[in-house]
């Protein structure tokens, strides 16, 4: 019977693999703080009875990633940042159910719910910038699991017990998995908190106040919005009836 040879990894190579997974786990989502561009400085500012409104759509992938800390366009989101300066003397409110992003094919896209926004980002956020393809926690866990399998496999080799304790080898791999899971969970929480902070809150914009935030629209390449024409914004000021405001996104200032 032919002898089955077991491919052995030296302790140094095993350690390098474990460290590689640790690097993936330790790198995480990076939030961004960007300045607020007041409506008066924007080319597409609209004045509605003293309520000044401006919008910026982040269609460009690099610009969006720079503003939101990760590849938000690849995640299937097209963010539109709104800024309000209320000089009307009355509170103003938007109606998100009647607010739409209109693309260059004249398709109207509704605002994504907060739950759908989180779901899309959690699938695509990069946990490890140093590892190509490590774009989701599931991939990270797969890499950690592979290392664990290697560790368990090589503890059956003759020289492993002499140079590295079996428990240490398996324990290190287990630690890599735990670290990966913790990093993924922390990143998800950080994304949820940051996007919640940047989302436009549906509450009255009081007189004399500046309000700002982001509306997230569906923007999966090839099947959803991948261009912008204008924002159809439904709002009301004081006790007046609701009206529709069109903000031209082709004229936004860069």
Image (cartoon, rainbow, N blue to C red):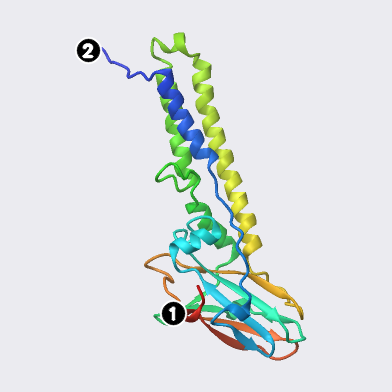
Report x, y in % for residue 121: 52, 56
* Foreground tag (2 vs 1): 1
Q: Residue at x 51, y 59 (%)?
A: 66
Task: Say above or below: 237 vs 18.
Answer: below
Report x, y in % for residue 143: 44, 36
The kind of secondary structure element at disc 1 is loop
The kind of secondary structure element at disc 2 is loop
Q: Residue at x 63, y 89 (%)?
A: 243
Residue 77 image label: none
Q: Quadrant of residue 106?
A: bottom left
Separation of marks 2 and 1 at Cα, in angstroms: 67 Å
Q: Residue at x 61, y 55 (%)?
A: 192
Q: Mark 2 points at which residue?
A: 2
Residue 107 image label: 1
Left or right of 140 on screen, residue 186 = right
Mark 1 surroundings within 10 Å by alpha-carbon count, few (fewer than 14), some (14 through 19), many (20 or more): some
Task: Say above or below: 66 vs 30.
Answer: below
């Amino acid at each position: 019977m032919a002898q089955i040879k077991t491919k052995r990894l030296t302790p140094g190579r095993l350690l390098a693999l474990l460290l590689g997974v640790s690097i993936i786990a330790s790198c995480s989502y990076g939030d961004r703080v960007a300045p607020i561009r007041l409506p008066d400085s924007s080319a597409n500012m609209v004045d509605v009875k003293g309520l000044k409104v401006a919008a910026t759509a982040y269609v460009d992938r690099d610009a969006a990633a720079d503003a939101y800390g990760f590849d938000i366009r690849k995640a299937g989101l097209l963010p539109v940042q709104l800024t309000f300066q209320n000089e009307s003397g009355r509170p103003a409110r938007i109606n998100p159910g009647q607010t739409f992003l209109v693309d260059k094919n004249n398709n109207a896209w509704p605002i994504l719910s907060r739950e759908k926004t989180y779901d899309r980002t959690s699938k695509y956020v990069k946990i490890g910038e140093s590892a190509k393809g490590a774009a989701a926690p599931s991939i990270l866990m797969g890499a950690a699991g592979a290392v664990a399998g290697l560790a368990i496999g090589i503890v059956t080799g003759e020289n492993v017990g002499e140079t590295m304790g079996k428990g240490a080898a398996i324990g290190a791999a287990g630690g890599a998995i735990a670290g990966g899971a913790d990093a993924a969970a922390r990143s998800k929480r950080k994304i949820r908190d940051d996007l919640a902070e940047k989302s436009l809150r549906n509450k009255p914009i009081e007189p004399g106040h500046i309000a700002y935030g982001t509306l997230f629209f569906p923007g999966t390449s090839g099947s959803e919005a991948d261009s912008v024409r204008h924002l159809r914004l439904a709002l009301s000021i004081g006790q007046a009836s609701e009206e529709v405001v069109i903000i031209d996104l082709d004229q936004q200032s860069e």
